[in-house]
């Protein structure tokens, strides 16, 4: 086989005037080979590649082509591996090796692979833009394997990342993600680059024109950034965050993350983003880390002193059980609002009830279905008219009361009128407070005199002592000499009484 070095030596020898015979003898080549080198002027001899022989796989090439055609119609992530193709051929009677199938598939995929798309490199100035995208990841929360929606941000200049997990992709989650990203970065950029999710874009118009969600426009106006939507199906227009989604899936979410709840997961994600930025060199400014470039960019970000009210609102009617139904779950309202319309404020992790702008109740939001999230204090005013509700009332069955009140409840349950007595004690909680009622119950238990009257009496004495004020006494009324007991005065009175009796 002729090498490049041998051809080079032959060409040098011929250039010096050596004959073809002497050159052929010197390098042990045939004279025809030397003549070919001199005639063609090539510096490298290329040998035609022979077609590979496939004696074992030959009869099954048609079936293998059919398998490849079926797989090409599927998304790339759902396509079968070479091992699956090999097993299917074995079922057809194939007795060849697995490596032969792998070589054939590799050559076929290489020849059928489409040409790679070309892109224009982009450059962003400090605080010019950030990119946003959602990803779906699998984690274990509280021992349950489930999928979470991860909001991913990336500052385009410094490449500083931020991630936050949610249970859904709702408008309230979008708002909360931007609020937390603003606090994490210390501000936001002039523009935000997005896909076209329905939570953000209400309607796609001609070109780059979009009709955005009104609440999202309020968010953008508060933090002073301009939303820019990508062309539908053109994810490369926000390629930085698309690459971040892919890299985070392998770097952060593999192996599967396991935490007690989503708040612990988000704390871990925040810490991971900080660690990543400190150890990763910037792709353009290689002498600096992502964190160092971010510190230079941070002072140019647009920071707002006040936080945006991260909720969506809607009007709901409270039913006669003092319950508001939202997203398949049931939240309690103060009983005085039964049958009335209130405003439901939906946050990313909580539900707030408001009346005329004034918040009247708040609950932790549940993402399950059919859950009752009830506050017992909302139903206490009803106990004076319906004391029997203590027996099976859903709000009171799981009420976590202080130990003293719970013990009084258990002691009174021995009496036939325990529900009436206990309802009177519980009705004092909105007036005096839970702590004061608990102290009064402790005093009644210490005196072994547990009853409605005793507890309320102690409660009245506690509150009277706490609310009483010292009366200032003027100097004119202040005693100058301390009085002392003198029983001789009574003897004088007794003597006078005896004299009066004799005279009469």
Image: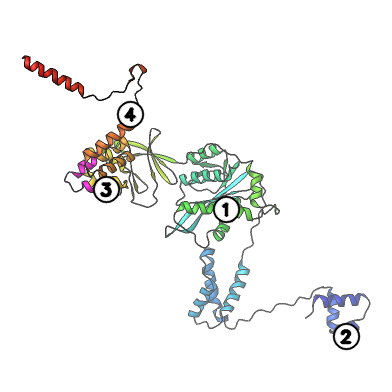
Q: Image quarter for residue 103?
A: bottom right
The residue closer to the viewer here, 74 or 280, is 280
Query: Under tag 1, what secondary structure?
Result: helix
**How many labels sit on residues?**
4
Residue that protrudes farthest toward the top in the picture: 503
* Left or right position of 427 against 222: left
Mark 2 or mark 4: name the one nearer the start of the chain.
2
Label of residue 407 in the image: 3
Residue matched to label 1: 273
Query: Under tag 4, what secondary structure?
Result: loop
The residue closer to the viewer here, 260 or 69, is 260
Q: Is residue 386 visible?
A: no
**Vertical placement of residue 164 versus 38, above or below:** above
For the magenta stretch, what is the residue range? 410-424
Q: Is residue 55 magenta?
A: no
Q: Residue at (44%, 41%) from the top-left corner?
A: 312
Query: Under tag 2, what secondary structure?
Result: helix
* Left or right position of 348 against 385: right
Q: Main secondary structure of the magenta part?
A: helix
Q: CA distance from mark 1 to mark 4?
A: 57 Å
Q: CA distance from mark 4 to mark 3?
A: 30 Å
Mark 3 or mark 2: name the one nearer the start of the chain.
2
Mark 1 or mark 3: name the one nearer the start of the chain.
1
């Amino acid at each position: 086989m002729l090498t490049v070095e041998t051809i080079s030596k032959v060409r040098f020898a011929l250039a010096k005037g050596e004959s073809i015979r002497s050159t052929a003898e010197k390098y042990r080549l045939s004279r025809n080979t030397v003549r070919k080198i001199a005639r063609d002027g090539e510096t490298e001899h290329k040998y035609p590649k022979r077609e590979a022989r496939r004696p074992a796989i030959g009869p099954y090439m048609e079936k293998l082509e059919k398998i490849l055609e079926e797989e090409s119609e599927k998304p790339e992530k759902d396509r079968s591996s070479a091992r699956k193709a090999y097993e299917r051929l074995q079922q057809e009677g194939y007795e060849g090796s697995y490596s032969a199938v792998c070589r054939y598939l590799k050559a076929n995929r290489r020849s059928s692979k489409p040409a790679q798309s070309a892109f224009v490199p982009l450059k962003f100035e400090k605080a010019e833009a950030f990119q946003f995208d959602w990803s779906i990841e699998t984690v274990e929360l509280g021992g349950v394997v489930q999928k979470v929606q991860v909001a991913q941000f990336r500052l385009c200049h410094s490449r500083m990342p931020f991630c936050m997990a949610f249970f859904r992709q709702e408008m309230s989650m979008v708002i909360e993600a931007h609020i937390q990203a603003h606090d994490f970065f210390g501000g936001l950029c002039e523009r935000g680059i997005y896909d076209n999710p329905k939570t953000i874009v209400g309607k796609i118009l001609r070109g780059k024109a979009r009709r955005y969600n009104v609440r999202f426009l309020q968010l953008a106006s508060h933090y002073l950034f301009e939303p820019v939507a990508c062309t539908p199906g053109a994810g490369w227009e926000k390629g930085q965050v698309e690459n971040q989604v892919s890299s985070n899936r392998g770097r952060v979410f593999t192996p599967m993350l396991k935490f007690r709840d989503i708040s612990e997961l988000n704390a871990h994600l925040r810490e991971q983003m900080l660690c990543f930025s400190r150890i990763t060199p910037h792709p353009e400014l290689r002498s600096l880390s992502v964190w160092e470039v971010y510190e230079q960019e941070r002072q140019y970000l647009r920071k707002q002193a006040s936080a945006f009210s991260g909720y969506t609102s809607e009007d709901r009617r409270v039913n006669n059980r003092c319950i508001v139904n939202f997203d398949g779950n049931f939240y309690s309202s103060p009983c005085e609002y039964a049958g009335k319309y209130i405003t439901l404020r939906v946050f990313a992790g909580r539900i707030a009830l408001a009346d005329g702008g004034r918040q009247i109740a708040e609950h932790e939001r549940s993402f399950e279905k059919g859950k009752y999230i009830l506050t017992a204090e909302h139903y206490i005013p009803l106990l004076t008219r319906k004391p029997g509700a203590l027996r099976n009332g859903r709000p009171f069955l799981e009420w976590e009361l202080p130990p003293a009140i719970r013990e009084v409840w258990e002691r009174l349950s021995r009496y036939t009128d325990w529900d009436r007595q206990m309802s009177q004690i519980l009705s004092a909680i909105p007036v005096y407070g839970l702590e004061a009622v608990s102290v009064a119950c402790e005093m009644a238990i210490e005196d072994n005199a547990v009853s409605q009257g005793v507890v309320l009496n102690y409660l009245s004495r506690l509150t009277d002592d706490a609310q009483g004020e010292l009366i200032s006494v003027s100097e004119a009324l202040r005693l100058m000499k301390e009085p002392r007991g003198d029983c001789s005065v009574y003897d004088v009175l007794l003597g006078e009484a005896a004299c009066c009796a004799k005279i009469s």
